[in-house]
Amino acid sequence: MWPVTFRDILDAEHRVRPLIPPTALRGYPALDEIAGATVLVKHENHNPTNSFKARNGVSLITSLTDAQRRRGVVAATRGNHGQGVAWAGRELGVAVTVCVPVGNNPEKNEAMRGFGATLVERGRDYDEAVAIAHELVERDGLHMAHSTNDPAVIAGAGTFALEVLRDQAPELDAMVIAVGGGSQAVGAMTVARELCPALEVYAVQAERAAAIHDSWHARQPLTRDSADTIADGLATRSTYALTFGALCEGLADFVTVSEEAIVDAMRVVLRTTHQLVEPAGAAGLAGLLALRDRLAGKRVGIVLSGGNVDRDTLRRAVCSTMDGA
């Protein structure tokens, strides 16, 4: 069963728009030359919290009942989802608790606290942080703000594709979208079904966090023991009930990219667009470059889904550029 409808995304847009204006969609000739395609870049890194996840947070919290808002919400995250929910909670007057794994990026932790969230630091990775969030739901009666398994989250993610395809359908041939849980890709496919049925949506994951990619090719849910990737926004070890079926039904293809390919995509973004982007935010471009031969000469949309790059990761990308890599 498809998890959201086009009507759900229109409703989410109505709830999101008072707090989040449409983001820019731009082309860059230097990027076109590298990709061998006409590339349209959706700048979700320009959102509040510098990520598309702000849309998801507002869509989720505005969908809650008054009683649910009074009890507060809890989320698990490596960074951007937690920031999106925390920011939305601050703007809408809802208390937010965020569970992060031990050793999570301190700059992202600082940002979440800055938006007023209470942080719980437990577990070894995102999946264990999710389990801890569920414990707080049971103990304290909080509402679970899951990063993927919530129709309001998926509908919120779909609002950026709505903006893209209102402008570009049917001129756009394809979109290449990074997958952590799948909300971006499923949201985009939902919009495409209504506005641009011929659009091909491709997904990309990091090789070192490829559970959903592997499951898609196996056509059955699989889990992995680890998700150790520089792209922490993609670091999940399993599929998700609300998105996996739609990914299997709707994607044109699903590829993986190496850690170095992701860092190289960060360098390309920096050089051609002069935008800072985190590894997960550059993964869509890394996927496009991996699909270069298949998408040559086409009009392709990618998403700079987040710009919350930490200093060490940015230094790695910039220093490699200076070294001529």
Image (spheres, rainbow, N blue to C red):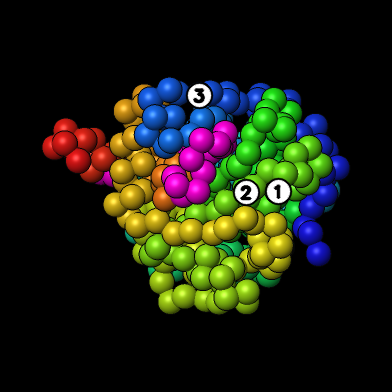
Image coordinates of residue 317 in percent, x first then y, are 26, 40
Image coordinates of residue 96 in percent, x first then y, are 61, 48
The label number, if any, that marks residue 201 in the structure image: 2
Image coordinates of residue 264 in percent, x first then y, are 31, 43
* Location of mark 1 (residue): 189
Disc 1 to disc 2: CB gap under 8 Å: yes
Local secondary structure at mark 1: helix
The label number, if any, that marks residue 258 in the structure image: none
Task: Reply yes or no: does residue 295 show up in magenta.
Answer: yes
* Location of mark 3 (residue): 27
User: Which circle's residue, 1 or 3, is located before the other in the chain?
Assistant: 3
Reply above or below: 182 against 285: below
Give the residue at x 57% y 58%. Answer: 253
Q: Main secondary structure of the magenta part?
A: loop
The stretch in magenta equals 291-313
Report the amino acid beneath label 2.
Val
Specify whether 61 is left or right of 231: right
User: Which circle's residue, 1 or 2, is located before the other in the chain?
Assistant: 1
Reply above or below: 65 against 211: above
Please rate how many residues cluster around mark 1, counting C-alpha atoms within 10 Å: few if below 14, some from 14 to 19, many from 20: many
Local secondary structure at mark 3: strand
| Residue farthest left in this picture | 323
Distance (Cα) linking label 1 and label 3? 22 Å
Distance (Cα) linking label 3 and label 2? 19 Å
Distance (Cα) linking label 1 and label 2? 7 Å
